[in-house]
């Protein structure tokens, strides 16, 4: 079976030779930027290309050839990452790289190690191309003869490996066949190697930067799928739909805007295709009310889903179809609710009957200015989607666009719109510190899982059964092991004091004095309306006295010691 995968091994110099630079940005910084962009392009493109990193000039020695070689050979060379599909973990690992204190980095020995590493890592795999990228300025000094260069070139040509040197700026007059004879030192050796390769080239940093601002995204072939649009139990319209991917295959990285005021859409070219555009627009913020699991809320409209619908939405099998759930006015579904980057174009089946039925359905939606809410059920991987069918009628014919809605299956509601990014980083960092100070990840989990109210009920029940508590008496005091459940980790509250005080300074709570005056006036009115007889005052005095007496008895009861047998009994009882 043919494959389109590409295997890439990157040689990166991390020695002192890569650190020497008259500018603020060193040669190592530029090389690391190139390597990070290569990793990003593979991740974002969705391809299955694999990449490995080999470091030379590092302090440690970790490669397969150094074990059986002579002393002093293949030292300060490390096989940093295996040949695999790049991930964000590898990206962060490369981002943490720094230069070492190694003086001379032997790039020729690293070439031999990298070619051997490529051969070992690609064993048993099939790749369309193999390439070796060299990120080095060749400023180091060491002796090397032409015979070793010839052997390296023969090995690379035998395995059909392309060698690319990045970061070397050579004048145009040195691009003829004898260019390596005109260049001194290791740069001349590298040009000699490239001339002997069947596939070899050089790229300057300017050329790499011009190409690295783009990345290719793989686009799958568009194919029609046959489904049925079910309206009730008697109407079934045979339709076909095709997935429309609006993302371009060649995407450019934009620079981060300096100010949030410049975060505006630049391209206003396709205004006539506003129905097909699913990008978020400036709409007023809408708050959604959390409903029960039987109701799905879209704007001001509700779609009732019974338990049969809920179970059907979770099924993994069944005929491919679109089940109509209801219709909603167009203005009640905002552009913010239409999320996702994929649009499905629904067209009628080729039969005349299917065309007439779909045309009638589209005309009915347009005349009523409504969108159709449907549930899409497919057999492939059991993917279930809920979305809106937007009717379109033009010269081409009658069509429907299916756009996915932000449907949360566990809550059966449309989630709230995303809040704007706050500009105050101090508030965010303070909240982060507050959360970190009150984490219970390293605390035991058994204590918070116990319910203090349940423990208290068990305690009262035990006292009643043992006749230690009369039915008409006051509630018993809380034992220590129950009070501990109400506040399991008091040290966390102490840790958060400084952060809470800082938040109070950053976000002061202002109280409207007019509201306080209104509350005071209402209290005065209530006091004037109360009866001024002596009996009511006597009752209040008696109640306050009883309250003080109960509080005193409660404090005395809290100080008494409870037997250990009683504590163990309630603790064991709560675990059952």
Image: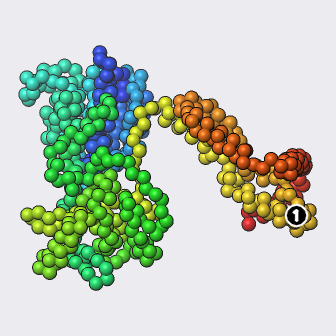
Outermost residue, top direction? Answer: 22
> Looking at the image, can residue 44 be seen?
no
Element at label 1: loop
Q: Quadrant of the N terminus?
A: bottom left
Residue at 41% from the left image edge and 33% from the top image edge: 423
Colour mode?
Answer: rainbow
Residue at 22% from the left image edge and 44% from the top image edge: 251
Figure quadrant of residue 178:
top left
Query: Which percent across, then down, holds residue 210?
Result: 19, 33
Query: Which percent across, then down, holds residue 171?
Result: 12, 22
Q: From this view, report whether residue 211 is shown above or below residue 296.
A: above
Query: Which percent across, then down, holds residue 61?
Result: 42, 34
Outermost residue, right direction? Answer: 467
- Mark 1 is surrounded, within 10 Å at the Cα level, by few (under 14), some (14 to 19) or many (20 or more) other residues, namely few
Left or right: 522 in relation to 470: left
Residue at 34% from the left image edge and 37% from the top image edge: 54
- Between residue 525 and residue 14, name the one nearer to us: 525
- Between residue 384 and residue 101, name the one nearer to us: 384
Query: Which residue is labeled 1 in the image?
Result: 472
> Looking at the image, can residue 217 be seen?
yes
Q: Quadrant of the C terminus?
A: bottom right
Figure quadrant of residue 163:
top left
Residue at 68% from the left image edge and 53% from the top image edge: 448
Query: Which percent across, then down, holds residue 304?
Result: 41, 70
- Numbered-mark total: 1
């Amino acid at each position: 079976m043919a494959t389109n995968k590409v295997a890439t091994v990157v040689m990166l110099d991390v020695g002192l030779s890569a650190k020497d630079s008259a500018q603020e940005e060193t040669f190592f910084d530029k090389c690391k930027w190139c390597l990070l962009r290569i990793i990003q392009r593979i991740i974002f493109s969705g391809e299955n290309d694999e990449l490995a990193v080999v470091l030379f000039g590092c302090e440690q020695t970790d490669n397969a050839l150094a074990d059986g070689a002579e002393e002093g050979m293949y030292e300060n060379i490390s096989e940093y990452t295996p040949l695999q599909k790049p991930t964000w973990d590898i990206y962060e690992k490369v981002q943490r790289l720094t230069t070492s204190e190694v003086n001379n980095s032997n790039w020729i020995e690293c070439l031999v190690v990298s070619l051997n590493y490529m051969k070992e890592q690609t064993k048993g795999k099939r790749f369309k191309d193999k390439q070796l990228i060299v990120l080095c300025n060749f400023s180091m000094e060491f002796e090397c003869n032409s015979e070793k260069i010839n052997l390296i070139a023969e090995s690379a040509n035998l395995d059909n490996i392309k060698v690319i040197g990045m970061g070397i700026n050579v004048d145009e007059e040195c691009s003829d066949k004898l260019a390596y004879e005109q260049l001194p030192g290791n740069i001349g050796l590298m040009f000699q190697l490239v001339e002997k390769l069947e596939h070899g080239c050089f790229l300057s940093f300017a050329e790499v930067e011009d190409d690295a601002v783009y990345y290719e995204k793989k686009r799958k072939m568009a194919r029609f799928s046959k489904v049925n649009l079910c309206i009730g139990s008697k109407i079934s319209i045979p339709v076909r739909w095709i997935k429309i991917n609006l993302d371009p295959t060649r995407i450019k990285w934009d620079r981060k805007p300096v100010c949030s005021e410049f975060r505006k859409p630049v391209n206003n070219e396709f205004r006539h295709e506003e129905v097909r555009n699913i990008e978020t627009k400036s709409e007023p913020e809408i708050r959604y009310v959390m409903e029960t699991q039987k109701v799905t809320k879209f704007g001001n409209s509700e779609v009732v889903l019974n338990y049969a619908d809920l179970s059907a939405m979770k099924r993994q099998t069944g005929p491919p179809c679109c089940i109509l759930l209801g219709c909603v006015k167009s203005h009640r579904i905002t552009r913010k609710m239409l999320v996702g980057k994929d649009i499905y174009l629904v067209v009628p089946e080729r039969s005349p009957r299917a065309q007439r039925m779909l045309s009638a359905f589209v005309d009915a939606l347009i005349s009523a200015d409504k969108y159709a809410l449907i549930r899409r059920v497919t057999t492939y991987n059991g993917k279930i989607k809920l979305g809106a069918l937007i009717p379109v009628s033009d010269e081409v014919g009658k069509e429907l666009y299916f756009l996915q809605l932000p449907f949360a299956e566990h809550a059966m509601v449309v989630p709230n719109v995303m809040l704007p990014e706050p500009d105050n980083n101090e508030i965010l960092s303070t909240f982060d510190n507050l959360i970190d100070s009150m984490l219970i990840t390293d605390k035991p989990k058994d204590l918070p899982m116990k319910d203090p109210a349940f423990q208290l009920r068990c305690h009262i029940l035990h006292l009643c059964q043992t006749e230690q508590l009369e039915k008409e008496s006051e509630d018993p005091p809380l034992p220590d092991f129950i009070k501990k459940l109400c506040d399991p980790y008091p040290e966390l509250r102490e840790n958060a004091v400084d952060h809470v005080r800082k938040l109070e300074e950053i976000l002061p709570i202002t109280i409207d004095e007019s509201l306080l005056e209104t509350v005071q006036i209402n209290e005065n009115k209530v006091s004037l309306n109360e009866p001024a007889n002596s009996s009511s005052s006597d009752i209040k005095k008696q109640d306050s006295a009883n309250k003080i007496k109960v509080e005193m008895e409660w404090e005395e009861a809290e100080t008494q010691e409870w037997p250990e047998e009683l504590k163990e009994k309630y603790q064991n009882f709560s675990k059952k």
